[in-house]
Image (tube, helix red, strand yellow):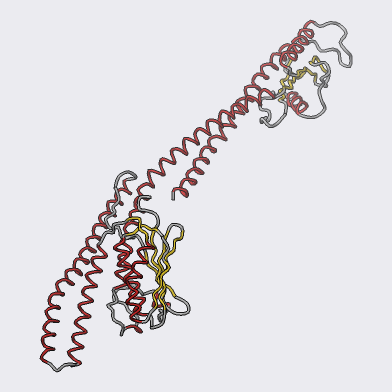
Amino acid sequence: MRTRLLPLLIVLMAAVLLALGIPLAVSVAAAQQQKVVVDRIDDTAFFAALAQFVTAPPSGSRRTDPDERLETLSRELESYYKVYGIRVGVFYANDAPMAHAPADWYLPQEGEVRNAFDEALLSRRSDDPKQVWPWQRHRLVVASPVIRDGDVVAVVVTDSPTGQMRSRILSGWLVIAAGETAAMLLAVGAALRLTGWVLRPVRVLDATTHDIATGRLKSRVAAAGGPPELRRLARSFNEMADNVEAVLEQQRAFVADASHQLRNPLSALLLRIELLALELPEGNEEIASVQAEGKRLAQVLDDLLDLALAEHAEADLSLTDIGALTAERVAAWAPTAEAKGVRLVGDCPPTTAWTDPVTLSSALDAVIDNAVKFTPKDECVEVTVASNGDTSTIVVADGGPGLTDEELTRVGDRFWRSSRHQNVKGSGLGLSITRALLAAAGGSIAYGHHEPHGLTVTVTLPRTGPTA
């Protein structure tokens, strides 16, 4: 969840920073250009004041007599150009130059300089030229009219390079970018802390839910840290888990107590039936049927007690050589299989897994007993031990009639038995007990088809310890 939430927060923060940074960058560029424009307007106003008192030559003729004011204006323009590198000139309305620097610079017929000149002839000063950006090599043109007796007699034009101004704008942008980067890093750090603070209770709740789902009913959520809503959710979850555990414990206790309490009256009843059988003729079918049903009921009660204990037991996990343990159980069941005419073979190489040896032995006894019970004479039951990455498996494959796809979905349910196997001895609780024992040991059991016929039972155990 954090990997999905964090990019969303980062995108939102980046959008906010861009929304603030872009207008700020534009404002920095405009401020730098405005500063230059104001400076050029002051310069053109100064030159216009000097040019205002220069006497214009007669129309259609060139000036031949020296004019002290014109010489002063020319010296100022020349000095200005040498110091700042800015082209400057004062031009009459007929485009004729009054004074200009450098000497080879004249009023062009088109372009920005011409546009500024024409605008100044209308008695308007250039105070808002087009914005120049750092990637543009444009020049900055400012023009001011020279007014005498209310008329525009000439125009002062400055044509400035923009390299220094663009450098200052770029430097300002770099400062903004550095600030934006620092703010972004700070925001990412804050988002990491925020998402961690918000999602930590969710992760704990998820882990605890998984523990309870896998049988560790004692697991609880530590209601510390996180938003108040999640802390309240953690407390509610703990209350729910306590109630569920209490209900399951009452159910288990009821089954165990009922099994135990019924066992004694049933034993007394079976004893009375045995005594009654001594007074009846030998081979009486009715009394034999009653004795068989009584023994079956006693077996069901024993299995119910075992199931209740298995669901409540806590496994003592250790690193176990399941290959050796499985080989031992195969050897123990070999005489039973041989007596029935079934071949019981095992392929049990040394393989380790984390499990409770006693629990696994009980589970294997139930699975192998089931396989031998349903396998006909001259067929084979194969027990194979293998490891696969993080898990180890014990596969028991028999040559019996097997189960249909529908029956595979129900095998292992309490008291369930296939309708085809109702005449086979059993209570329908053996595989349920096996599943409960393996779940307590951190393992699992699965069922499948065995070709060409039969059932495959796969016991899976973890190879990684609970502390890894």
Q: Quadrant of residue 262?
A: bottom left
Picture mark count: 0
Q: Residue at x 40, y 71 (%)?
A: 396
Q: Quadrant of residue 303?
A: bottom left
Q: Quadrant of residue 161?
A: top right
Q: Is residue 18 above or below residue 30?
A: below
Q: Position of residue 134 (x, y in %)?
A: 66, 30
Residue 374 left/right relative to 311: right
Residue 219 left/right relative to 14: left
Q: Position of residue 279 (x, y in %)?
A: 10, 91
* Foreground of the two, 169 or 80: 169
* Foreground of the two, 348 or 308: 348
Residue 27 left/right relative to 71: left
Q: Residue at x 45, y 75 (%)?
A: 450
* Foreground of the two, 70 or 151: 70
Q: Position of residue 206 (x, y in %)?
A: 36, 54
Q: Position of residue 337 (x, y in %)?
A: 35, 77
